[in-house]
Amino acid sequence: MKESARDPLLRRLAGGLEALDCAGRTLLVGASAGIDSTVLAHGVHALAAKLEIRLVLGHVHHGLRGAAADADEAFVRSLALGLGVPALTRAVAPRRLREGGPSRSRPTLQEAARRLRYDALGEMAEAAQAERIATAHTLDDQAETILLRLLRGSGPSGLGGIPERSPDGRIVRPLLGVSRAEIERFAEARGLLWREDASNRDPAYARARLRRDWLRGLGEAFNPQWLRAVGDLAEAQRRESEWIEPLVRQEAEARLARDGDGWTLACAGWSELPAALARRLARRVLHEAGAGRDVSRRHLERMLSFLASGRTGSILELPGGLVLERGRGTVRLRRGPGGRAQHGC
């Protein structure tokens, strides 16, 4: 019996790669040197002949951890050499992305690193002629993401968590249903080596605090299958979002129009929209206007009430320097100084 048929992680990985349309393609695996991406690289390599996959490793050096980051890059090059596959690397500078402009409009360091990382992976995929980019997000990453968003007051869309693939299908996450415990068992059984990133335990990061203060012993105290339960919640929410998203897009196209340096939003029939659709539509409008990071449920509720019943001539100030100004049958969304916010509606 072949190894892939015996090993549960390899069976699940093979199923994920096939479902995500990776078979018969060149696949760039994002390799950080950590245990998750190291297992993904070894797993894809073990399945490469069966699935006719050409494997390439891609490493992004973020320039944030000095000699430790240099050692991560060296490790990935050594890993690729041991597997007999090509390795590409790119250096990025997240701190530079945060320079200039008001602090509220700048990305956090983690956001900047994430944005540049995916850009760099895309560049390496182009260079390698790879049709797919695989990242090593796991079920634990999914559960942590959902819980962090829940604690921060996320709406329904945020509870969909990390998607299995990007909208264009280029970025895939074939280990999203695999727990870190399964990853560790696979690595231990094969005597794999990897590198630990000390920032994963740094309490300065919310995810590290969540792991340290909340998640230890959660299975014993409440539900041994809590990871799977949270993962199932995320999948169910993503499926619902996929169903409602065309309706949101249809309403946005019908109601929202660019108007010089602002936007015009038609309000007719707004109060008759289902609450879930209206809320998602309002969030989409604000995201397109560049206020996505600062939008809270309170802002959305104020905006929804304003759109449904605001008085002509009234205004509402919103995050990101945006102002809603009520006209006859329409609301203009613009940037710039506004008067005192009014919610009279």
Image: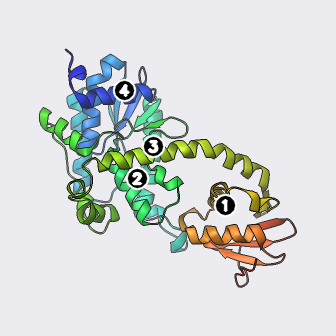
Q: Quadrant of residue 298?
A: bottom right
Please tell me which residue is depicted at 33% across the width and 26% down the height of the picture.
14
Q: What whole-number distance in Å separates the C-alpha atoms at marks 2 and 1? A: 34 Å
Please tell me which residue is depicted at 86% across the width and 65% down the height of the picture.
329
Q: What whole-number distance in Å separates the C-alpha atoms at marks 2 and 4? A: 33 Å
- Between residue 308 and residue 57, name the one nearer to us: 308
Q: Residue furthest top?
A: 1
Q: Nearer the viewer, mark 2 or mark 1?
A: 1
Type of amino acid under label 1: Ala
For the N terminus, give its image quadrant.
top left
Circle 2: is it few (<14), some (14-19), or many (20+) Cα within 10 Å?
some
The total number of labels drawn is 4
Type of amino acid under label 3: Glu
Residue 141 seen: yes
Disc 2 is placed on an element classified as loop
Q: Is residue 260 above or below residue 339?
A: above
Disc 4 is placed on an element classified as helix
For label 3, the residue is 235
Disc 3 is placed on an element classified as helix
Please tell me which residue is depicted at 65% across the width and 59% down the height of the picture.
275
For label 2, the residue is 92
Type of amino acid under label 4: Gly
For label 4, the residue is 15
- Between residue 45 and residue 249, name the one nearer to us: 249
